[in-house]
Image (cartoon, rainbow, N blue to C red):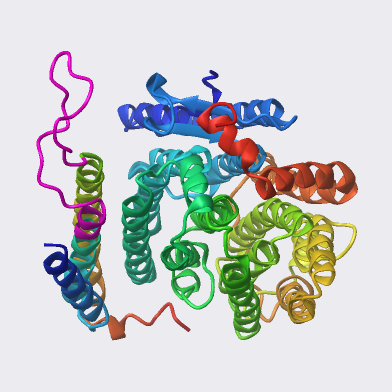
Amino acid sequence: MILLPVLPIIIPLAGAILCMLFRRNLALQRDLALSVSTLLLIVAVGLMAYTRDGTIAVLHVGGWEAPLGITLAVDMLSSVMLVLAGLLAVAVSVYACFDLDTPRVKFGFFPLMLILLMGVNGAFVTGDLFNLYVCFEVLLTASFILLALGGERPQLEGSIKYVALNLLSSALFLAGVGILYGMAGTLNMAELAVVVQQGERGGLVTMVAVMFMMAFGIKAGMFPLYFWLPASYPTPPAAVSALFSGLLTKVGVYSLIRVFTLIFCTDPEFLHTLILIGAGLTMLSGVLAAASHYEMRKILSVHIVSQIGYIVMGLGLFTHLALAGTIIYLAHNIIVKTNLFLVAGAVNRLKGTYDLHKLGGLYKERPGLSILFLISAMSLAGVPPLSGFFAKLTLIIAGLQQEAWLIVAVALIVSLLTLYSMTKIWAYVFWKPAPNELPDLNPMTPAAWFIFLLPMVGFTVITIGIGIFAGPVFDYAQSAAGQLMDPSGYINAVLGGGE
Amino acid sequence: MEVLLAIVIGTLYTGGLYLMMRRNLIQLIIGLGLLSHGANLLIFTAGGLRQGGAPILAEGEKMFATVPADPLPQALILTAIVISFAVTAFALVLFLRTYQAVGTDDVDELKETDT
């Protein structure tokens, strides 16, 4: 038994408690959040190294063996997600030190961020459906408060939509859990997989699967219930938006992948085709909505939706290669999307607006920042040799192998439209001459500005790095996808020896 | 008993969804509450309704004499109730703050973020 899998949950919890103990000492809270995030990243990298050879780190909490006790299990997909969450946490902590106003920090931004991370990490490591539900509620509650923190009118309006739809999805999830328990008598994912595989009750399983698809689909921002996302994500400060865009929808996607590769893989003709249709419509509706917006954060938010479509497309195709593509895309998207939100926040920091019509001429003033944006935007659109290119290439090759011409065509068209949206931002914000001189609002010293930009530089380096070292990344994704396609390793590791 | 509970659960879901689609914030929150009650009862029913003793083995026994009630669904429901209580409390405060900021409880008026 190895205790490592529980650390990603305990560390942020301890950090959050410490932060709350030193409620008045804001500088200390900042340092705490930063060090806790760094620790988290180190632990996650440790877990990644531990699971690198295909071992699955399993912890039966309190020594109660599965399926009776609480099981934590980390495979390669989970460890990638943990590493990404750690990276994001470090970047957002650094960024938040400069971006957030004091009242928000005073009302507990840092402890809330850590609680959110605890929920996210919990969802990544848990091996039990009910615990997944609990982790979802933990991260949702933290995100509700983070979203509404500050209490500006758009924030409150966005929060209501976010809260209502996410609670609806939680209720659906809970109902699905209940029916599944009545059917299988267990909620341990590995045992559920075994029971559902032998099960005769195909129809009921499919129905529950669709309930889970709805529940996770809402949380992931899939068509048709993604409307809460563009309504709420652009409203809070950039640090919060970046955190949400990187992590929250991806937890939904992760759960979709986990559940539909481990448990509900008995009827792929129906279920995974349904996912594929959803993926295509998600991509298309997201990117079309982006074309009509002229506010930086709005464009980026609806692009989250369209990117989710790509990630889910791999799951819908449900082949080894497609899942590898999904994993690369997931990693690429978390990094690039967060980075774009951070850059948008920096632009707002300089000029005090996100409006494409009012902005302009930033390339002349801040070439460094502009290049950071350009690289991430091109990566998002899928220009070689950046990470987005290889992620999309893998998915499209997988689609061609399956002869799924329609989804491949949609993916290519959406890719082109993504390029259009990104060049629109580039042309309006950075290239065109400023319509009227906006004053430079930046009160930061050059040194502070440099540290402020560091997270963005880091993410940009990573997106280039994934592109350059695409070979090793692809190999890793292949083995992670292999684990997903053949869940017997996971099941044996959790239930203890080939039962 | 199952049939009766199924009807109750169905009514809760119908009522919950209907209220959620109304334009009033308070009705929205009541709808959410009904929905989570429905889900809780669903777990309870799906987990198997059984009249029986507590699932505790007496000293020295190895088997239950009669099949006991399954304690797990009740534990799940308890957790879910606590969570939904906290979330409802938060939602109430959020709705109150929104009402104060926007000055209306009509959901249709909350369209500033939709364009």
Q: How many marks?
A: 0
Query: Quadrant of the rendered structure where residue A22 is?
Result: top left
Query: Quadrant of the rendered structure where residue A285 is?
Result: bottom right
Residue A7 visible in rendering? no
Residue A151 lies, with reference to residue A119, above or below; the image says below
The magenta segment: B41-70
Where residue A119 appears, x then y in whole percent?
Answer: 43, 43
Q: Nearer the viewer, residue A153 or A143?
A: A143
- Magenta stretch prevailing secondary structure: loop
Residue pictured at 58% horizontal, 30% vertical: A493
Where residue A477 appears, x then y in whole percent?
Answer: 76, 46
Residue B54 visible in rendering? yes
Question: Which residue of the protein is positioned furthest toward the top in this rendering?
Answer: B60
- Position of residue A259 in the picture relative to residue A181 (left or right): right
Where residue A70 appears, x then y in whole percent?
Answer: 40, 32
Quadrant showing the C terminus of chain A: top right
Residue B41 lies, with reference to residue A79, above or below; the image says below
Q: Nearer the viewer, residue A450 or B18?
A: B18
Where residue A137 appears, x then y in whole percent?
Answer: 35, 50
Q: Nearer the viewer, residue A196 or A367?
A: A196
Residue pictured at 31% horizontal, 27% vertical: A21
- Position of residue A90 in the picture relative to residue B94 (left or right): right
Residue pictured at 55% horizontal, 23% vertical: A4
Residue A294 lies, with reference to residue A143, above or below; the image says below
Residue A223 lies, with reference to residue A130, above or below; the image says below
Q: Is residue A366 magenta?
A: no
